């Protein structure tokens, strides 16, 4: 009986080894298997914002005029984003591009990667803000790895750009969103002649923490010659003096509507145009 049992268990072990072998071959082919849509394992570029900011600041440091494109909410519209990138490249006069956030619909790692591969076709540097859709699951961690901090700033010629996370409803309110202290840190900034503030969600919108809307206005007006504020989120192209204080807020629509802004900033202020592509 002992010999029979030993023979039987040895046979099971051999069968198990034969079944394990093809399974190992499949696992070795990493392209065939995604561990989890929110696994955060990034197979494309990382640290994009910091690298592109260095390019922007170096290239434009002595310029008195700059021109940039503002796009937002490309999320599930991949073909339209491809066309948007092609339209911006074809102009030949854009110094850099700002993406206002919502690269993704569900913050799945592959969505970030697919969008990045399209944006990498831009012939000029670009930066990306964090959108509320990009915060789902582990999306914020993927964003930080791929692009960097959710609040950041850079100089483009004479202009300071302050880029903010304003997706307040995606958090538990244990930290201030928007971070008024970050904005305040640029009071009295002598490195620039004017300031443009960029965010994903604008004041008085559903995701914005409107409990601090007036404090937000105060901090913006304390910046060095604030020119305007830019945002996306609501999938409509609109311009408003939101606070009635003379400072304009420009909202750009989603990629599905095939529109983006082009802003030109010079010693006389700024001009803008809405581009249909």
Image (cartoon, helix red, strand yellow):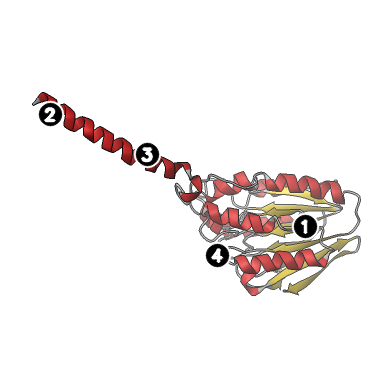
Q: Which mark is residue 4?
A: 2
Mark 2 residue element: helix
The disc placed on residue 123 is: 1
Q: Please tell me the numbered disc located at residue 206.
A: 4
Q: Secondary structure at mark 3?
A: helix
Q: Is residue 141 above or below residue 65?
A: above
Identify the residue shown where x is 80% and y is 47%: 55
Can residue 229 be seen?
A: yes
Does the residue at mark 3 contact the one at mark 1 (Cβ under 8 Å)? no
Quadrant including the C terminus? bottom right
Quote the CA–CA distance across marks 1 and 4: 35 Å
What residue is rendered at 52% in x and 46% in y? 40
Could you tell which of marks 3 and 1 lies nearer the N-terminus?
3
Report x, y in % for residue 88. 76, 65
Residue at (8% x, 26% y) in the render: 1
Q: Quadrant of residue 211?
A: bottom right
Along the line of sight, which residue is nearer the eye, 108 or 216?
A: 108
Q: Are marks 2 and 4 in contact (CB under 8 Å)?
A: no
Judged by depth in the image, the label closer to the viewer, 2 or 4, is 2
Q: Which x, y percent locates residue 75? A: 58, 63
Q: Can you tell which mark lies on residue 21?
A: 3
Depth check, mark 3 against mark 4: the one in front is 3
Could you say which is closer to the camera, residue 62 or residue 221? 62
Q: Earlier in the sequence, mark 1 or mark 4?
A: 1
Which residue is depicted at the point 59% across and 51% down? 177
Q: Secondary structure at mark 4?
A: loop
Q: CA distance from mark 2 to mark 4?
A: 72 Å
In the picture provided, is 213 more to the left or to the right than 270? left
Q: Earlier in the sequence, mark 2 or mark 3?
A: 2
* Label 2 crowd bin: few (<14), some (14–19), many (20+), radius 10 Å: few
């Amino acid at each position: 009986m002992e010999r029979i049992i030993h023979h039987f268990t040895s046979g099971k072990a051999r069968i198990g080894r034969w079944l394990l072998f093809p399974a190992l071959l499949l696992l070795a082919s990493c392209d065939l298997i995604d561990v989890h849509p929110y696994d955060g394992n990034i197979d494309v570029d990382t640290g994009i914002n910091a690298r592109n900011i260095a390019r922007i600041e170096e290239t434009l440091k002595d310029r008195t005029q700059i021109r940039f494109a503002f796009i937002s909410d490309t999320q599930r519209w991949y073909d339209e984003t491809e066309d948007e990138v092609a339209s911006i490249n074809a102009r030949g006069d854009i110094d850099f591009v700002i993406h206002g956030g919502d690269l993704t619909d569900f913050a799945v790692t592959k969505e970030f990667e697919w969008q990045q591969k399209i944006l990498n076709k831009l012939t000029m540097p670009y930066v990306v803000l964090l959108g509320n859709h990009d915060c789902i699951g582990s999306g914020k961690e993927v964003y930080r790895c791929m692009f960097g901090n959710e609040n950041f700033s850079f100089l483009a010629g004479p202009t300071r750009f302050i880029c903010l996370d304003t997706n307040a409803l995606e958090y538990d309110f244990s930290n201030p969103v928007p971070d008024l202290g970050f904005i305040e840190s640029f009071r009295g900034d002598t490195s620039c002649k004017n300031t443009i503030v960029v965010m994903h969600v604008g004041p008085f919108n559903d995701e914005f923490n409107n409990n601090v809307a007036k404090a937000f206005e105060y901090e913006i007006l304390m910046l060095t010659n604030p020119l305007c504020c830019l945002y996306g989120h609501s999938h409509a192209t609109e311009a408003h003096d939101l606070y009635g204080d003379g400072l304009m807020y420009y909202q750009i629509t989603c990629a599905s509507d095939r529109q983006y802004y082009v802003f030109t900033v010079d010693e006389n202020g700024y001009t803008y145009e809405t581009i249909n592509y």
